[in-house]
Amino acid sequence: MISLSDLRQFKAQGRKFSCLTCYDSSMAKAMELAEIDSILIGDSLGMTVQGHDSTLPVLVEDMAYHTAAVRRGNQHAMIMTDLPFMSYATLEDALKNARIVMQAGAQMVKIEGGAWLSETVQNLTRNGIPVCVHLGLTPQSVHVLGGYKLQAKSREAADQLIADCRAVVEAGAAVLLLECVPAQLGKEITELFPHTPVIGIGAGAETDGQVLVVQDMLGLSFGRVARFVRNFMKEQSGETAILDAFKAYHQAVQNQSFPAREHTFQVEL
């Protein structure tokens, strides 16, 4: 089973690692066979599974249920689970809800925010709970951000994001996840923190790992598709097409053919 130590070793070796969202046992088994390195039980299930228009209605109980299902189907990947909207607003809430998803099978929790999360990160880490901090476009704050759009487009905003990363890493964040930021910034942050694996989604090709929502990479998104998405399913055919799509994604991340330039945001900072 891949662990946080393995992700750190991958970064030290310059080996890119793959991550996909997953919500059920059968998909988890297919990802195991494809040797996907890490799985995120994302609160994106609010939209992809439950049919909501955002992640905000998702409950901790939902996350625990899907985490347990994924863990039963996959004994290979490192599993991260989102703590959903307002479930870590206080230190007490963060500990209680992190315990629930960790006992369901997660190896790490993911929370969204910046420097203000430092005390939460420190408290969780002190209690044996590894933390991934999600920065850039943070879907739980979509109403504050004004929609799903590119973040940190100016040098000033990029420097603020870097400062947020530094604060949470110093507090003990084990992994950073950057969403929808310029490729140059993804590269800068990945290089600034040599001992902290950085996962990107729409953050360029230079991050240590890449993550996609599984429905997006299988072509099961029926609205507007984000720029950083690649449909790996379209490239496959036959009875094992889904498994082959997972394998193709894993290989493309490792050989750095994904993300290509057309999947990144090229902004001069």
Image: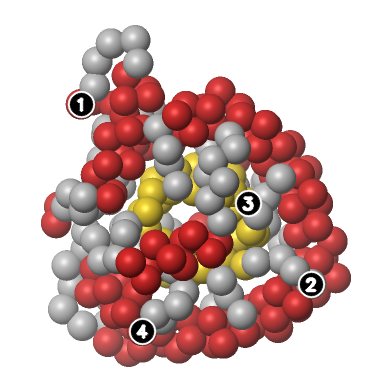
Disc 4 element? helix
Q: Which residue is mark 3?
A: 81
Mark 2 or 3, closer to the camera: 2
Quadrant of the rendering where the C terminus is positioned: bottom left
Q: Residue at x 34, y 10 (%)?
A: 239
Q: Residue at x 26, y 66 (%)?
A: 206
Residue situated furthest top in the rendering: 239
What is the C-alpha distance between the residues marked 4 and 2?
A: 26 Å
Q: As shown in the figure, which amino acid type bears the numbered disc 3?
A: Thr
Q: Earlier in the sequence, mark 4 or mark 2?
A: 2
Q: As shown in the figure, which amino acid type bears the numbered disc 4?
A: Leu
Q: Which residue is mark 2?
A: 127
Callout 4: 10 Å neighbours few (<14), some, many (20+)?
A: few
Q: Earlier in the sequence, mark 2 or mark 3?
A: 3
Q: Which residue is mark 1?
A: 235
Disc 2 element? loop
What is the C-alpha distance between the residues marked 1 and 3?
A: 29 Å
Q: Is residue 160 left or right of residue 55?
A: left
Q: Quadrant of residue 127?
A: bottom right
Q: Residue at x 56, y 81 (%)?
A: 168
What is the C-alpha distance between the residues marked 1 and 4?
A: 35 Å
* As drawn, 227 above or below 131: above
Q: Position of residue 226 (x, y in %)?
A: 30, 47
Q: As shown in the figure, which amino acid type bears the numbered disc 2?
A: Asn
Q: Quadrant of residue 210?
A: bottom left
- Tell me, yes or no, whether the two marked residues, 1 and 3, touch with CB atoms within 8 Å: no
Q: Is residue 137 left or right of residue 132?
A: left
Q: Position of residue 214 (x, y in %)?
A: 43, 36
Q: Quadrant of residue 50?
A: top right
Q: As shown in the figure, which amino acid type bears the numbered disc 1?
A: Glu
Q: Position of residue 252 (x, y in %)?
A: 24, 44
